[in-house]
């Protein structure tokens, strides 16, 4: 097995924040795996960065009336901070607009070009005449020929997962103008993927049938069975990495050529900062390359990028591509366009100090083999029943009893019963089980095994009942609490990949960082002893222990007479009102999505029919108008209501001059109770609306000759 682990996580588009679907399907599992490999003594490079050249960036920029650079600068920082706040331990998080990335991706393209790996082809591409631009795949929407989805993109249908070309779409339209595009001839450079079919078949179909996830293997096999076609590696766009050829003005690298090279360019940045050679991670047979992605990226990471690296000739192929399925939210597909999501940065704000609760909830519902669902009620249950009720409850009881009985000093055991030995044997085997599942990318099973440490601990205390035994057999309680402390230390150690913030707090409670062990404390078979020292008298810090080392400890993790610190709550119960607030946020989003006018304000509180019948709306005419002194927004109006002539003070001066409103026929709420405004008694309210430019507009009768005083209802 290779010592180096080159771990990548799919580059998020820098056109919006990351949400729980991204976290559950890519970033948290990748982080767990990277943390586990580091603790196992591997030389890990965990690499990611913002994809800043995708079409979604330019679409968002056009909508907001800013530049693409403005968009990526904004969201790169939001995304990067969200990952940091949630404990995603990237060794390097960079961006594809960096100079280093531009040079790396252009150099990669030039190597393939100089080797003759591209074909130059003239083709007809969709062109938006109004926008005067060629349309990249994601600028074209239409009906998917496979599933009938009317919002399929020119390169992929996100509903059925089919890979498409723009020419396959039914009724294509430009996302720039909404018009039907025309076909116009242009030249681009293509990578003939069909020439790599034999290589891909041998590498994946024959080489990874038994160790890759079925969803990944199945998709790749299906594409290869259908036959691959040449794919353009350049695009006619004005945002992206320029094609490094003299006759390629106005052309950029295809984003799925440019983006995965980001893994390489970002590794270069990390290696330069840390005195390492990036080639040892990308061009050495002693390095394992693993891509963590969502299922919609399988074709790019298992066919296009490997074909690119094979064409280049210097790079290793991925050992595994553990792609996850999608996570739904409250039984509905997560959608950034509909704002149907739980955003990472908002979660951190709404649940301060509870990052591990989200990590736990998402890992326990990770969409490993099929789409899964996140609900706020389930999130609450996982926290209250499992993290608080099982994990936190065990640790709190152990720490409280150690301080109550022994002033926080771990007691020396007085002999071990059969139940003691059985419990210790069970605990010692759990890390092997966790490792077994993580190496198979089965994160839910691994998480469950970690929680089994706490379950075993709770059962042990419940069976032994030291709070009862202390009165008649205090020597027995010393052993019971000694074993409970060892279980706590195992939890602190092996929860770290899953719950890093909790692990740190628990290690602080147990004061683990100050513990040193003599070499004689371990079995001679221990790998650390064999590789690190022949001096059996030297000492090893707890902090230096690797994952497998704990299986070779001959005695305890925490020795007798070790001082632990006062307990603090690892998890807090989440109350119903907190969850109800989150559910209401989603309900507000759902209602907002129903709007036919996105600028319309939400509906006010309901009124009863009897309340409505009390409203007296009438037609009226403004007779006179003048500005109110020292009030820029107010006009004093004299209004003929047909019932009487009365004074109304209205905040319309920023939209109308007095001269503009005189003689205007309007609608007035006649029976509104009078109130004084700037010392003037106002006897009614005029009906107005707000236009898109912020100016006010009167609601007027359709018939300009209608008499004053006519009731409206």
Image (cartoon, rainbow, N blue to C red):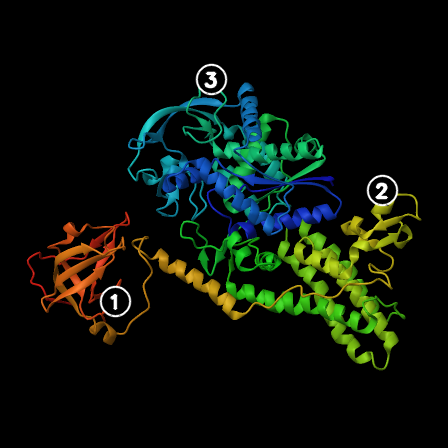
Q: Name the residue under label 1.
A: 676
In the image, residue 675 lies at what x, y percent?
25, 68
Q: In this view, does 204 lie above or below 365?
A: above
Q: Name the residue under label 3.
A: 246
Q: In this view, does 269 lie above or below 538?
A: above
In the image, residue 192 lies at what x, y percent?
49, 27
Q: In this view, does 276 lie to the left or right of 573?
A: right
Badge 1 element: strand
Q: Earlier in the sequence, mark 1 or mark 3?
A: 3
Spatial separation of the CA atoms under disc 1 and disc 3? 75 Å
Q: In this view, does 163 lie above or below 477?
A: above
Q: Which residue is painted at 36% across and 60% down in the image?
A: 591
Tell which of 234 and 308 is nearer to you.
234
Q: Which of marks 1 and 2 is in front?
A: 1
Q: Name the residue under label 2.
A: 531
Spatial separation of the CA atoms under disc 2 and disc 3? 54 Å
Q: Which of marks 1 and 3 is in front?
A: 1
């Amino acid at each position: 097995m290779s010592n180096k682990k080159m771990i990548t996580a799919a580059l998020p588009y820098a056109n919006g924040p990351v949400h729980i679907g991204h976290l559950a399907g890519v970033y948290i599992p990748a982080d767990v795996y990277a943390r586990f490999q580091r603790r196992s003594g591997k030389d890990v490079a965990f690499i990611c960065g913002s994809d800043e050249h995708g079409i979604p960036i330019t679409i968002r920029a056009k909508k907001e009336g800013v530049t693409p650079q403005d968009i990526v600068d904004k969201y790169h920082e939001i995304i990067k901070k969200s990952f940091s706040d949630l404990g995603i331990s990237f060794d390097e998080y960079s961006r594809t607009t960096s100079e280093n990335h531009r040079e790396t991706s252009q150099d990669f393209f030039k190597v393939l070009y100089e080797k003759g790996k591209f074909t130059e082809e003239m083709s007809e591409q969709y062109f938006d005449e109004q926008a005067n631009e060629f349309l990249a795949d994601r600028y074209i929407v239409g009906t998917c020929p496979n599933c009938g989805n009317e919002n399929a993109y020119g390169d992929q249908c996100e509903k059925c997962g089919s890979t498409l070309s723009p020419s396959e779409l039914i009724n294509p339209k430009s996302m720039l103008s909404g018009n039907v595009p025309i076909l116009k001839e242009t030249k681009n450079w293509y990578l003939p993927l069909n020439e790599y079919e034999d290589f891909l078949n041998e590498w994946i179909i024959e080489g990874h049938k038994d160790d890759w996830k079925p969803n990944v293997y199945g998709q790749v096999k299906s594409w290869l069975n259908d036959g691959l076609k040449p794919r353009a590696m350049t695009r006619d766009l004005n945002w992206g990495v320029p094609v490094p050829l003299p006759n390629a003005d106005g052309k950029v690298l295809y984003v799925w050529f440019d983006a995965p090279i980001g893994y390489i360019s970002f590794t270069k940045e990390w290696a330069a900062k840390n005195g390492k050679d990036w080639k040892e991670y990308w061009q050495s047979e002693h390095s394992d390359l693993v891509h963590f992605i969502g299922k919609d990226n399988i074709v790019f990471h298992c066919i296009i990028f490997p074909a690119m690296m094979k064409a280049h000739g210097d790079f290793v192929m991925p050992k595994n591509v553990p792609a996850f399925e999608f996570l739904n939210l409250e039984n509905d597909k997560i959608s950034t366009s509909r704002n149907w999501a739980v955003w990472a940065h908002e979660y951190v704000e709404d649940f301060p100090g509870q990052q591990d609760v989200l990590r736990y909830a998402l890992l326990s519902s990770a969409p490993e083999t099929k789409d899964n669902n996140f609900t706020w009620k389930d999130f609450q249950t996982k926290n209250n029943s499992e993290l608080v009720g099982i994990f936190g409850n065990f640790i709190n009881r152990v720490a409280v009893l150690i301080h109550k009985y022994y002033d926080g000093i771990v007691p020396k055991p007085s002999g071990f019963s059969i139940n003691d030995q059985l419990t210790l044997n069970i605990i010692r085997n759990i890390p092997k089980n966790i490792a077994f599942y993580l190496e198979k990318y089965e994160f839910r099973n691994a998480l469950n095994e970690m929680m089994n440490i706490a379950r075993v601990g709770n059962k042990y205390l419940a069976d032994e009942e030291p709070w009862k035994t202390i009165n008649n057999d205090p020597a027995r309680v010393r052993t019971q609490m000694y074993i409970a402390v060892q279980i706590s230390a195992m939890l602190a150690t092996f929860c770290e990949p899953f719950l890093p913030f909790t692990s740190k707090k628990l290690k602080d409670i147990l004061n683990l960082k100050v513990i040193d062990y003599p070499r004689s404390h371990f079995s001679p078979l221990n790998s650390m002893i064999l590789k690190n020292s022949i001096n059996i008298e030297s000492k090893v810090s707890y902090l230096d222990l690797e994952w497998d080392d704990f299986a070779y400890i001959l005695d305890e993790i925490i020795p007798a007479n070790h001082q632990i610190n006062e307990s603090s709550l690892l998890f807090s119960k989440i109350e119903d009102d907190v969850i109800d607030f989150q559910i209401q946020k989603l309900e507000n989003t759902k209602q907002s999505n129903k709007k036919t006018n996105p600028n319309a304000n939400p509906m006010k509180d309901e009124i009863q029919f009897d309340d409505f019948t009390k409203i007296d709306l009438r037609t009226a005419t403004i007779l006179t108008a003048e500005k109110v002194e020292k009030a820029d927004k107010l006009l004093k109006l004299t209004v003929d209501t047909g019932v009487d002539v009365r004074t109304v003070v209205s905040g319309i001066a920023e939209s109308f001059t007095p001269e503009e409103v005189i003689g205007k026929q309007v609608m007035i709420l006649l029976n509104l109770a009078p109130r004084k405004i700037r010392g003037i008694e106002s006897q009614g309210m005029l009906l107005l609306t707000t236009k898109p430019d912020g100016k006010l507009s009167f609601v007027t009768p359709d018939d300009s000759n209608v008499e004053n005083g006519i009731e409206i209802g």
